[in-house]
Image (spheres, grey):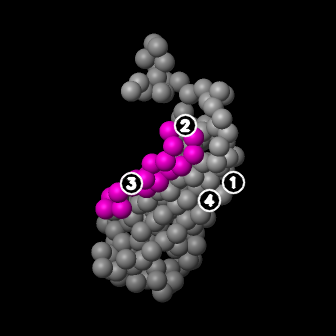
């Protein structure tokens, strides 16, 4: 398979999607941020001076999805019709699990937007909690599912 973002001279190019059909595109991405148990407890309690960590991370993740073409060089600016971020506090592994779902009806997919949303939500959590836990690790960012377009459906094995 040829790389789609490289032209015949071997240079970067934005893929021409003008001939593609408009279809409903949905992408789901996952990531997590590991932290000290005390940090996770404080997120649950909502006891951060900066505010509700997950509420701010929710807005940050959505903003990240919307701003994806501003930070990823060859990403198309597209009209996102929906973006949702969900969080799960996992006390067994001392992490916050982050899942984003991004939707659009268009000529190109929203996988990068979903991945960006998860990443920015994780970075926002880090920023909000770094005063008490600089050892946090943002990890396991991956596309879980995508649908729409010529390439059809991709679904990752749930064992990641």
Q: Nearer the viewer, mark 2 or mark 4?
A: 2
Circles 2 and 4: CB atoms closer than 8 Å: no
> x and y percent of residue 129 in the render?
44, 71
Give left or right: position of 3 versus 22.
left
In this picture, residue 34 sits left or right of residue 43: left
Identify the secondary structure beneath mark 3.
loop
Mark 1, residue position: 81
Q: In this view of the protein, which residue sits in the foreground, 142 or 57?
A: 142
Q: Secondary structure at mark 2?
A: loop
For the record, the magenta segment spans 141-160
**For mark 3, does the 10 Å Cα neighbourhood hold few (<14), some (14 to 19), or many (20 or more) residues?**
few
Q: CA distance from mark 4 to mark 1?
A: 7 Å
User: Between residues 23 and 67, which one lies in front from this camera angle?
Assistant: 23
Whether 45 is drawn above or below 65: the answer is below
Crowdedness of circle 1 by 10 Å Cα count: few (<14), some, many (20+)? few
Q: How far apart are the two marked residues, 3 and 4, measured between alpha carbons?
A: 20 Å
């Amino acid at each position: 398979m040829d790389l789609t973002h490289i032209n015949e001279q071997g240079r970067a190019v934005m893929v021409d999607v003008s001939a593609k059909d408009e279809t409903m595109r949905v992408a789901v991405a996952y990531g997590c941020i590991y932290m000290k148990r005390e940090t996770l407890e404080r997120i649950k309690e909502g006891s951060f001076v900066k505010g509700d960590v997950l509420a701010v991370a929710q807005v940050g993740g959505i903003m990240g999805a919307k701003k994806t073409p501003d930070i990823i060089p060859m990403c198309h600016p597209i009209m996102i019709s929906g973006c949702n971020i969900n969080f799960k506090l996992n006390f067994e592994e001392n992490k916050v699990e982050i899942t984003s779902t991004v939707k659009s009806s268009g000529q190109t997919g929203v996988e990068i937007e979903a991945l960006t949303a998860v990443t920015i939500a994780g970075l926002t959590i880090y920023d909000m909690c770094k005063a008490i836990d600089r050892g946090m690790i943002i990890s396991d960012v991956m596309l879980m599912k995508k649908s729409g377009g010529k390439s059809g459906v991709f679904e990752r094995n749930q064992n990641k």
